[in-house]
Image: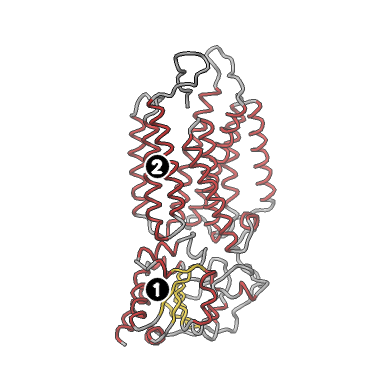
Amino acid sequence: MSEPPALVGAPGLAAAVSPRELLIQAAYLAASVLFILGLKSLTKPDSARRGMQQAALGMLLAIVGTLFHHQIVEYHWIVAGLVIGGVIGWPLGTRVPMTAMPQRIALSHMFGATAASLVGVAEYYTAYRPLADGTLPGVDPARMAALGFEVLFGSLTVTGSLMAAGKLQELLPGQPITFRGQNVFNVAVFALAIGLFLFLIAFPASAAAFYTMIGLALVIGVSMVLPIGAADMPVVVSLLNSYAGLAAAATGFAIGNNVLIICGALDGGSGFLLSMLMCKAMNRSFANVLFGAFGTPQAASARSATGLVAKSISAEDAAIQLAYARKVIVVPGYGMAVAQSQHQVRELAELIERRGGEVKYAIHPVAGRMPGHMNVLLAEANVPYDRLYDMEEINQEFANTDVAVVIGANDVVNPAARNDPSSPIYGMPILNVDQARSIIVMKRSMNPGFAGIENELFYDPKTRMLFGDAKASLTKLVTEVKAL
């Protein structure tokens, strides 16, 4: 951003700021406040919608403020970009189902990182190309550091996000893709990229080093994500979100844009904290997520289900249990999201409540494919917010629950996390469904969850399996309860 014009008058007076510059900075300040308020509002389900509206308004103000900048001399390409972005963004926001939201978010990070990287390349080309007389521009270490950081993290986020989206969409194998010496290769490539970054700070006019660093960063993004299993992709997407935010903040420093610095720092910080919280919810470390190849086929270390028999139940018998239960806890999972059965869940809960029962919803932090996945689906079905309980709030209530209904959840209710030290999910905090007096599990089949291991809960003497599509099963339950 260019320097404001100097104040005409006595020496020593502060530089004057033009009305246009004041308008731009006012728009940026308002946008930054709205971003912070929006992020704060997203912490509670009943204010999340307002938070999204605040953030959207903030982005609108940031765009409008930028369009007033005096360095913009024509708007043809800008208008074209706005139209193309709107055409792409509208279906991404309205047509993508909730089950595909994690990969849509990964693509959004890819677009943001691409924008930051292209800005960095353009700024480098403009600032460090040879002058008309053939001489090289002067060294500006601080600006080069910002540009280098921007394109380094931006480029690895581009390819990393594409790999994550591919795994989540099952265009790439969900299992880790590894080769001998992979971690050594990754460390070596990253070290070389960092070495070029430091070299550029001292010798910024070295274009070959700059573009080589970008190429290495693109390779890092691929090699970093491919060895990680699909089970860990939500954590990876959150981490890539942090990288994209850091790249945006570096862009702000490079071009002197305050709103980019603020929103990039918010994005980077919140993404990193979310990644930490998700790892804590799975009782795992960043190192284990990034290098543990979680999601590989399990060896015989996990307990086998050989000789165990899962008992099934009919919709009629399950309806009788639910109709006369005094306390019911519903545990939604990815199966509910796939079947889009949240409306049937709410209808069944209302029928139980009309018969004098109490229904609560237990939400695990990593249920589904991203944090808050179940909250959003249930809110979409108009389930009251005060019926949704976090794991810490509701775990102690399972022991006094007549029926726990598990809809498509798997690893987050697996007692092996408490009972089997050889299990890959051992130590992961889970919902204490196995402590309920009676358990009904709705699943299409006995296939394992993301961890690739058998679920001990399915073979518990108190558990009955209601097989089939969750939406069809719940519709039948609703019909049977109404008939009682």
Give the quadrant of residue 191.
top right
Image height of 458 relative to 252, above or below:
below
Q: Amino acid at mark 2?
A: Met
Q: Residue furthest top?
A: 133
The percent position of residue 299, horizontal first and vertical second, equals 65, 69
Q: Nearer the viewer, mark 1 or mark 2?
A: 2
Residue in the foreground of this view, choosing between 208 and 140: 140
Residue at 64% in and 69% down: 426
Residue at 62% in and 30% down: 209
Q: Is residue 416 left or right of residue 73?
A: right
Q: Amino acid at mark 1?
A: Ala
Q: Is residue 384 left or right of residue 11?
A: left
The percent position of residue 456, horizontal first and vertical second, equals 57, 78
Residue at 48% in and 23% down: 3
Compare marks 1 and 2 and give the one earlier in the sequence: 2
Q: Which residue is mark 1?
A: 470
Give the quadrant of residue 203.
top right
Give the quadrant of residue 218.
top right
Residue in the foreground of this view, choosing between 400 and 374: 400
Q: Which residue is mark 2?
A: 59
- What mark, if any, has residue 229 been given in the picture? none
The percent position of residue 95, horizontal first and vertical second, equals 34, 54
Residue at 57% in and 41% down: 153
Tell me the element at label 2: helix
The percent position of residue 407, horizontal first and vertical second, equals 44, 73
Tell me the element at label 1: helix
Give the class, few, some or many, for how many residues have Cα within 10 Å of label 2's Cα (few <14, many ≥20): many
Q: Which colour style is shown? A: secondary structure
In which quadrant of the rendered image does the C terminus lie?
A: bottom left
Q: Is residue 202 left or right of residue 63?
A: right
Q: Could you tell me how many numbered marks the image carries?
A: 2
Instruction: Estimate the spatial distance between the alpha carbons at disc 1 and disc 2, rounded to whole Å.
Output: 39 Å
